[in-house]
Image (cartoon, rainbow, N blue to C red):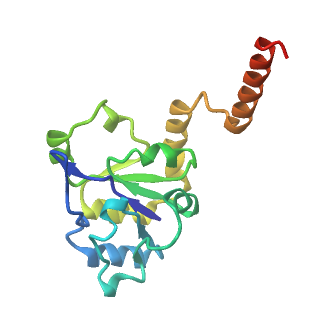
Amino acid sequence: MVYAPTFREINRKRERFTLPFKNIAALYASLEQNNLILIVQLHPYNQKQWQVPQEYRKRLQLNRSHMTTSELLVASDALITDYSSILFDYSLLAKPMAFFMPDIERYQSERGFYDDILEKLPGEILQTEAALCEWLSKCDVEVASHVVSFKEKWFAETPGKASVNTIDYLLRQKTEDNLLKGE
């Protein structure tokens, strides 16, 4: 499972990242109880700002491997994020996701949203640590039905042939250019 919070800045100044869990012990207990590992994937600007306390590193880990964010998402069973656009990438995988937003009022007032995205999110909005721990215990494939609907809405025009279409386009362009040159 991956936790990938959005990059934060206020008035064009980076915020120092702090894990939004007041009770890491309760989160860790929930991870332990559900036999889960939560890998925290921070924005590159925040990578050096936070460390997992030693006693929680068995189940709560900061991604310090050579895995890219994309590779980590493919390897994960579920995603927890907040306001990040990573939800669009992850929806292509049709896996469960949740949105941990304990600071939603602050985020709306200081930064806001372009659209009424909160009503369109493909997963539960969790505002408390207790709600997050409860979600961890029920996170399974059935939760992903919201994600499939979201993916179909946002990527209906994406049949999975991007590489083929790009090559066809380039070959057509080359042929058209050659015809214009009289070749």
Residue 153, above or below 71: above
- In-front residue for pair 174/83: 174
Residue 141, above or below 177: below
Tally of numbered discs = 0
Which quadrant does the C terminus fall into? top right
> Where residue 88 sits in the image (x, y, percent)?
47, 42
Q: Residue furthest right?
A: 183
Name the residue located 32 percent from the left edge and 60 percent from the top edge: 45
Residue 144, above or below 65: above
- In-front residue for pair 180/15: 180
- In-front residue for pair 180/85: 180
Which image quarter: residue 122?
top left
Name the residue located 41 percent from the left edge and 47 percent from the top edge: 123
Name the residue located 44 percent from the left edge and 70 percent from the top edge: 63
Q: In this view, does 51 lie to the left or right of 103?
A: right
Q: Is residue 119 left or right of residue 168?
A: left
Which image quarter: residue 161?
top right
> Where residue 167 sits in the image (x, y, percent)?
74, 33
Q: Which residue lies furthest to the bottom in this view?
A: 55
> Where residue 5 sits in the image (x, y, percent)?
34, 56
